[in-house]
Amino acid sequence: MTASTDVRAKVIGMRDDLANTLIEREVAIEAAFTALLCGEHALLLGPHGTGKSLLVRNLCQRIDGARYYERLLTRFSTPEELFGPLSLSALEHDRYERVTAGTLVEAQVAFIDEVFKANSAILNTLLGVMNERIYHEGGSAHPVPLLSLFGARNETPEDNGLNALYDRFLVRVIVPPLTADDSIRRLLAMQEQPVGEMISLAELTEAQQQVASIALSSEATEAMLTIKHELEAEGIAASDRRWRACSKLVRARAWLEGDAETTSEHCEVLTHALWTELGHIRAVERVVSRIANPLHLEAIELEDAARDLYDQRPAPDHAHLAHALEPLLKQLADIHARLEQRISKAPAKRTYRARQALGRVETWHRALSQLALKSLSKLHMAPGAA
């Protein structure tokens, strides 16, 4: 095994170990690893209690030797919490300096929960640290070792003054609550597990260098251009800076998949980088998937069709509920069979979104089946039933 494949094998092992530890978080984990391999920042969006903090902590504690910083922001947070208190001894000599030991300024990996509660006193310095990797103090600029900063929040920012901070997160992932019954069962039975596969800071740096050396092929370039034009036609635009950074994500996806050169398929990762408003997510998914992974697009469309069928379910007090549910159940079963067939014919690394859709179709089918069974039970127990 070469040094190159050895480092990649360790990264893959760490990613897979984390995916086994956290239920239904494969997409967020893959996105977080991709951001880390690019030296970019990632934002996890979702309701409280969905494991956003747990995911980041589990990832960061698997990087041996990396200085880690974590902070929960509130609207009362001060710069001292992130960048350290003022040095009293320096003030005695008319110097404005902070004691930065153990703060964000010296961290290689960081996690800020409720990141959009950053106030104006914090914001400008935080932007410099994230974008330029520079900390400004007392009229001087100091480089910082930050590789990636992970943020978490339950919603996108409403204050336009936070748009610059929001834009610094190249990768954005929605982390929803668990829905599948099997996932809930696993959650209830889960016990605390020891930290598994780890990598050193030196190995992470080597992995980042290998990612940067991946060639961006003309095929991948043209795929990105097509995605750009189609999104702009739908009124969804990204800055030149974001597009340039997106090329790093495509390289990182190729590296994770063991490929020496990027292809259009690796552009699938851009579903996490090209939306700004929540209402744009589906459109971005459709455009990117049509070019990078047609199965992904088909899964989205079949999932949407299945959701529409589920939403057409009659009220529980419908006079002929079981009979009314029969065609809906049949169509859901047909969608399920089609997804299963398509998944069986596709490479496993291209099927996650389709398997996710399959699970949701199963959940909706199960819910309608249980509704039909309850209706039949009531019918048989009704007075005068044969």
Image (spheres, rainbow, N blue to C red):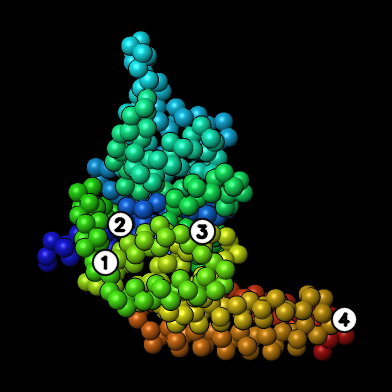
- Which residue was labeled with disc 3? 175
Indicate the quadrant where residue 84 lies: top left
Query: In the image as oriented, which residue stretches furthest toward the right?
Result: 384
- Which residue was labeled with disc 4? 383
Q: Which residue is drawn at 57% across and 44% down?
A: 161
Residue 358 drawn above or below residue 15: below
Q: Is residue 133 visible?
A: yes
Q: Which residue is drawn at 39% across and 87% down?
A: 345
Q: Sequence order check: which comes first, mark 1 or mark 2? A: 2
| Label 4: few (<14), some (14–19) or many (≥20) C-alpha neighbours in 10 Å | few
Q: In this view, does 328 lie to the left or right of 86?
A: right
* Amino acid type of the residue that numbered disc 2 sits on in the rendered structure: Leu
Q: Sequence order check: which comes first, mark 3 or mark 2? A: 2
Q: At which x and y percent is residue 234?
A: 57, 72
Numbered circles on residues, count: 4
- Which residue was labeled with disc 1? 255
* Amino acid type of the residue that numbered disc 4 sits on in the rendered structure: Pro
34 or 228, nearer to the observer: 228
**Mark 3 or 4, closer to the camera:** 3
Mark 2–mark 4 CB contact (< 8 Å)? no
Q: What element carries label 3?
A: loop
Real-space CA distance between mark 2 and mark 4, rounded to the nearest whole angstrom: 67 Å
The label number, if any, that marks residue 37 in the structure image: 2
Q: At which x and y percent is residue 180?
A: 54, 68
Q: At which x and y percent is residue 313?
A: 73, 78
Mark 1–mark 4 CB contact (< 8 Å)? no
Q: Sequence order check: which comes first, mark 3 or mark 4? A: 3
